[in-house]
Image: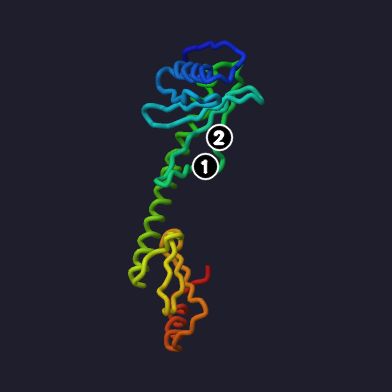
């Protein structure tokens, strides 16, 4: 790796943050691009050109070290999906950007390459579940001749005067919670509902 030496001690001026980012970019031999907010005085990101991986680097004063972590992929709702044991590595300022680049390549990148596909799978499953839930919401709204709740996207309220007060759709649309409030229904309806439950319901 290319050795880059910067003046120490570390200063939290935006210009110094930009210098740290460019030095790390150089130390990583052109495989990564530094992304720096010109007004930021404590952190920057590195993006790998080929994979699109992003690493967040913060410059901490106590203790004085770089802290590098992963900017994990996000779903369509902009929620980040990360492993439960998401790895962060630390390297002392006195060791310089070359040592940080080495630690990223040897310790952080292998972990990212292992976990990133799993996070993409998690996102795909999350979005598929959401699609299933929304399809169920629309189907139920159509059956009830109403529309989904404006405030709770997986809830459909029944029309006034009908036995169904509210239906809440589960996370993937395969199950719902039926709320009939305190309304009274014909005994024949109750018999059919009880028979259906006895035939189809399984304790979980």
Q: Residue furthest bottom?
A: 187
Up/down of 180 relative to 73, above or below: below
Q: Horizontal and vertical percent for residue 145?
A: 34, 72
User: Do callouts 1 and 2 mark residues in contact (Cβ within 8 Å)?
Assistant: yes
What residue lies at 46% left-to-right and 17% top-to-bottom? 22
90 relative to 33 in the view: left or right: right
Q: Quadrant of residue 93?
A: top right
Q: Nearer the viewer, residue 97 or 151?
A: 151
Q: Nearer the viewer, residue 42 or 130?
A: 42
Q: Horizontal and vertical percent for residue 112?
A: 47, 34
Looking at the rendered structure, the secondary structure element under dot 1 is loop
Q: Residue furthest right?
A: 62
Q: Which mark is residue 111?
A: none
Q: Horizontal and vertical percent for residue 72?
A: 47, 38
147 relative to 1 in the view: left or right: left
Q: Residues within 10 Å of mark 1 (few under 14, many from 20)?
A: few
Q: Which residue is mark 2?
A: 87
Cα separation, mark 1 vs mark 2, equals 9 Å
Up/down of 172 relative to 198, above or below: above
Q: Quadrant of residue 191?
A: bottom left
Q: Residues within 10 Å of mark 2 (few under 14, many from 20)?
A: some
Q: Nearer the viewer, residue 168 or 124?
A: 168
Q: How many marks?
A: 2
What residue lies at 48% left-to-right and 43% top-to-bottom? 81
What residue lies at 57% left-to-right and 10% top-to-bottom? 7
Q: Which mark is residue 83?
A: 1
Q: Horizontal and vertical percent for residue 89?
A: 57, 29
Q: Nearer the viewer, residue 99 or 149?
A: 149
Up/down of 90 relative to 99, above or below: below
Q: Quadrant of residue 42?
A: top right
Looking at the rendered structure, the secondary structure element under dot 2 is loop
What residue lies at 40% left-to-right and 60% top-to-bottom? 133
């Amino acid at each position: 790796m290319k050795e880059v030496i910067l003046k120490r001690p570390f200063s939290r001026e935006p210009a110094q943050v930009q210098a740290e980012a460019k030095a790390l970019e150089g130390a990583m031999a052109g495989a990564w691009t530094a992304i720096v907010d010109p007004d930021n005085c404590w952190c920057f990101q590195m993006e790998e050109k080929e994979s699109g991986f992003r690493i967040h680097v913060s410059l901490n004063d106590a203790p004085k070290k770089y802290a590098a972590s992963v900017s994990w992929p996000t779903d369509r709702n902009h929620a980040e999906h990360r492993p439960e044991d998401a790895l962060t590595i630390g390297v002392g300022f006195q060791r310089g950007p070359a040592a940080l680049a080495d630690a990223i390549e040897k310790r952080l990148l292998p972990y990212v390459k292992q976990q990133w596909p799993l996070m993409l799978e998690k996102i795909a499953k999350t979005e598929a579940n959401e699609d299933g839930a929304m399809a169920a919401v629309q189907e139920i709204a159509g059956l009830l001749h109403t529309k989904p709740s404006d405030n709770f996207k997986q809830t459909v309220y029944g029309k006034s005067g009908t036995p169904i007060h509210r239906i809440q759709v589960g996370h993937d649309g395969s199950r719902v919670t039926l709320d009939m409030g305190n309304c009274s229904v014909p005994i024949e309806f109750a018999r059919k509902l009880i028979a259906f439950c006895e035939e189809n319901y399984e304790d979980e």
